Amino acid sequence: MTTNETALSTASSLVADLVARFSEPDWLKQAREEALAKYGETPAPKLEKTDLRRRAFDIGPFSNLTAGGSDRARRLLESLQNSPFVFIRDGVVVKTNIPSELEEKGIVFSSLHEAVGSHEAIVRKHLSSVVPAGESKWAALNTAAWTDGAFVYVPRNTVVDSPVTFVYESSAQAHGAAVHSLVVAEEGSQLAYTEVFLVDGELESGKVHSDVLEVVAGATAHVTVATMTEYKKGPTNFTVRRARLASDAKVDWLYGDVGDGFTVGLLESDLVGNGSTSTVSGIGLGYGRQHMDMTVSMLHRGRHTESDIVMHGGLRQRANSIYRTSTHIFRQAVGAGSEQHDRMLMLDGTARADAIPMLLIDENDVQRCGHAASVGQIDAWQLYYLKSRGIPEKQARRMMIWGYLEPTLEAFPNEAVRDFLRQQIDEELV
């Protein structure tokens, strides 16, 4: 039996186990089985600078899933006591904090599996509508084998006052992970949603960690999505986060990653509605032998749509990152406007980064469309200036790096997560 056949057999058993364990409805069972078939027939791809043909696409079994949580996770949850959160470890819901005020407003915040039972019509309508299973091998695997995730539903013209937070932790006992989350913001609603992915211990190599986030933003809705991840070495990490925007909707993405893993990621906004807008502000700190292949994409389909992308990254040791920023202005997307800014900072001479901006313009009547990209080391003259003022070199370097990262970090809507991410970065800059 080939490696691919073994992975497919394992995934098939996992799907059957999940359907039976959660007594899933027929439509979800069928969706899983169709996605499993697509996963089996889709070859592992070779990306522009990342060859996945020799990477494992194996996941499960999940029979040893564990509850509990690491000390770091518990400290983070303690700091979230006054705000809504769902904590899942190795696919098992460990703890939730859902204030009654949310339910009184008709707001739903729960695990995705719970929502399949309690809000089946909404989940069935939107699940896999933004990230279809057939778009990639890892999307198909996620659709087939997701164990749980977050579900958020905000009714029409409803404002969620506090950020809601989904925390997922993988432990050394897990054999990969498949996490799927769905956020639905109806017309005129407002929401700040935060995701945190943590790792507890050394993860198993040759497995897959896959997480998918789908955001449905109704007309005039405003959704802020902040994600903090630490993709660690061991598994192959695949992530897809995509929002679909209706007319005059707005989605602001904030992205932070600190890790040393092998990761292929896509963060994308599909600006379908006229007048819709989206922004991305991202920071990353790679170390060890990290390989981060990250694409940030804006699809302009509606008229007079706007987008802006700002990506800042710092790399230490032998980390290697590929940051792609892509803007596609489709035909008849009249009056669209977009800007891209990619800046990669090499903190060690052995690190490597590629900043690849892409503009795909199929419409003549464009308001603005530009890009800027740079890769380099800390400015020697700026460092000399700080040292000349009596600041030790190590401290001066930290000040310059934080000046580079802090504006994005400060935009995170959740103070507890912001402080947690700041601590993660600070520990790696020692």
Image: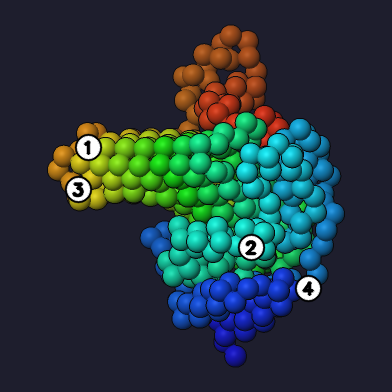
Instruction: Please name the residue that numbered disc 1 is placed on.
Output: 335
Q: Secondary structure at mark 3?
A: loop
Label 1 residue SS: loop
Q: Mark 2 or mark 1: which is in front?
A: 2
Q: Where is mark 4, residue-wise?
A: 63
- Distance, label 4 to label 3, CA atoms, is 51 Å
Distance, label 2 to label 1, CA atoms, is 40 Å
> Where does label 2 land, which residue?
116
**101 relative to 231, above or below:** above
Q: Is residue 364 visible?
A: yes
**Nearer mark to the viewer, of 4 and 2:** 2
Image: 323 above or below 379: below
Describe residue 64's horizontal placement relative to residue 410 as left or right: right
Q: Residue 332 has which mark?
A: 3
Amino acid type at image mark 3:
Gln
Q: Residue 346: x percent and y percent?
A: 51, 38
Check disc 2: other Cα within 10 Å, few if <14, some if 14-19, many if 20+. Answer: some
Q: Amino acid at mark 2?
A: Val
Q: Secondary structure at mark 4?
A: loop
Q: Can you give x and y, in whole percent of width and height, for residue 223 in the image?
A: 51, 39
Kindly check if marks 1 and 3 are in contact, taking CB atoms under 8 A apart as contact. Answer: no
Query: Between disc 4 and disc 2, whose residue precedes?
Result: 4
N-term mark: 4 or 3: 4
Tell me, for residue 298, which label it has, or none: none
Q: Are marks 2 and 3 in contact (CB under 8 Å)?
A: no
Is 128 left or right of 336, judged from the image as shown? Answer: right
Give how far apart the Cα atoms at labels 1 and 4 are.
Answer: 53 Å
- Where is residue 34 drawn, in percent x and y? 51, 78
> Mark 2, mark 3: which one is toward the viewer?
2
